[in-house]
Amino acid sequence: MVKRVAILGSTGSIGKQALEVIEAHSESFEIEVLTANNSTGLLIQQARQFLPNTVVIGNKEKYKEVEEALADLPIKIYAGEEAIAQVVQMGTIDVVITAMVGFSGLLPTVNAIKAGKQIALANKETLVVAGDMITQLALEHKVSILPVDSEHSAIFQCLAGEFHNPIEKICLTASGGPFRGKDVEFLRKVTRCEALNHPNWSMGDKITIDSASLMNKGLEAIEARWLFDLTPEQIEIVVHPQSIVHSLVQFEDGSMKAQMGLPDMRLPIQYALTYPGRLKSEFPRFNFMDYPQLTFEKADAKVFRNLDLAFQAMDKGGNMPCILNAANEIAVDCFLKGEVGFVEMSGVIEKTMRQSTFKEHPTFDDYMNSNTEARNIASGIINERKK
């Protein structure tokens, strides 16, 4: 049976790789919806190739450009964030790949779950910001949330056939990024170009910076807490520079399972789309002789303070992870613009967490308000530093 797929964020790194997977298995998948925020040229190219039912451009100012470019095709064109949040409810969609970056993925994911769509989750911020609410909604609407992040896909694969066996702990592996082993003084001088030079993975700018600061691993820990119903104490971060062991699960008898493979995001994307089956792929295969040594190190949360801040937010609960995420999005954006230093990002996030209003049992509106408040506070802190 052909699955009809909506890709939210089709012009980003995950979206483009998802389209590669779908193109390779066109007998199994059809593209129903493509969305992008600003990248009109690539969105138009994708639409002409895959002929979706609907295309949405988030930036309303670019609607006319997309409409004119696709005028000769029977494709519905919409614009705006509201349209992205609404289009996921279409009855012709079977699976929604949430490949948008940041807080913007929350509302479309909520609407897709309420509409009963299967979720292939690449937008980790959705569970970071509102994990309790999202998991409850998924249970209520009997919707499966299948992880696309390589680490969470690895845990999910390790748990296949083991869901009745309690987890003692999980180990999320991290490459360590481009600054593994460096000290704080080195990090103070880091440039945008250096931070975007990831040794193993090809990702978008925001996720690459998060990986360099280890915030990405902190966000993944919070995501794992909700995906697999864990406590913070059951989650360990281990630096694994080769990025071959994507993560591990330890069971109560002491036995451990790991999922391994070359660092290629197409594999977890394909697994999320085909679960519980596996389709043959032409992806490069891992060879042990190419990696005679696999090494593991302790993550240094004293140097990479974002990791510690993420665990603090997870421990605190409530809307604190939402505050953490909002402050980090502002800090990363300002770092990419050269307005704040690499190490200074942690200070901005920490101060925002202290100054924002804490809600122990937040509602959806609380999450929205917390996101706005934290962004304003973080922006204010950065503006003060620039004076």
Image (spheres, rainbow, N blue to C red):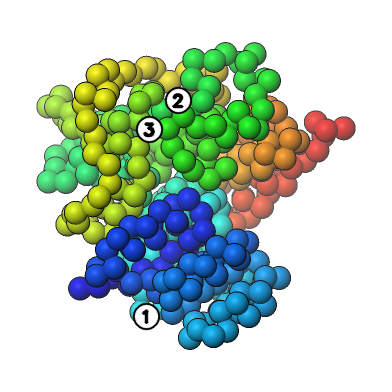
Does residue 93 appear left or right of residue 271 in this picture? right
Q: Secondary structure at mark 1?
A: loop
| Observer-nearest of 223 and 339 | 339
Q: Which residue is mark 2?
A: 176
x then y, percent, for residue 148: 35, 50
Mark closer to the observer (1, 2): 2
- Mark 2, Cα crowd under 10 Å, few <14 / some 14-19 / many 20+, is many
Q: Which residue is mark 1?
A: 91
Q: CA distance from mark 1 to mark 3?
A: 38 Å
Q: Residue 381 sits in which quadrant? A: top right
| Observer-nearest of 200 and 314 | 200
| Observer-nearest of 76 and 127 | 76
Residue type highlighted by circle 2: Gly
Question: Is residue 237 visible to us here?
Answer: no
x then y, percent, for residue 185: 64, 13
Q: Which mark is residue 119?
A: none
Looking at the image, residue 166 lies above or below residue 291: below
Q: Secondary structure at mark 3?
A: helix
Residue type highlighted by circle 1: Gly
Viewport quadrant of the N terminus: bottom left
Does residue 279 appear left or right of residue 369 in this picture? left
Q: Which residue is mark 3?
A: 232
- Mark 3, Cα crowd under 10 Å, few <14 / some 14-19 / many 20+, is some
x then y, percent, for residue 43: 54, 66
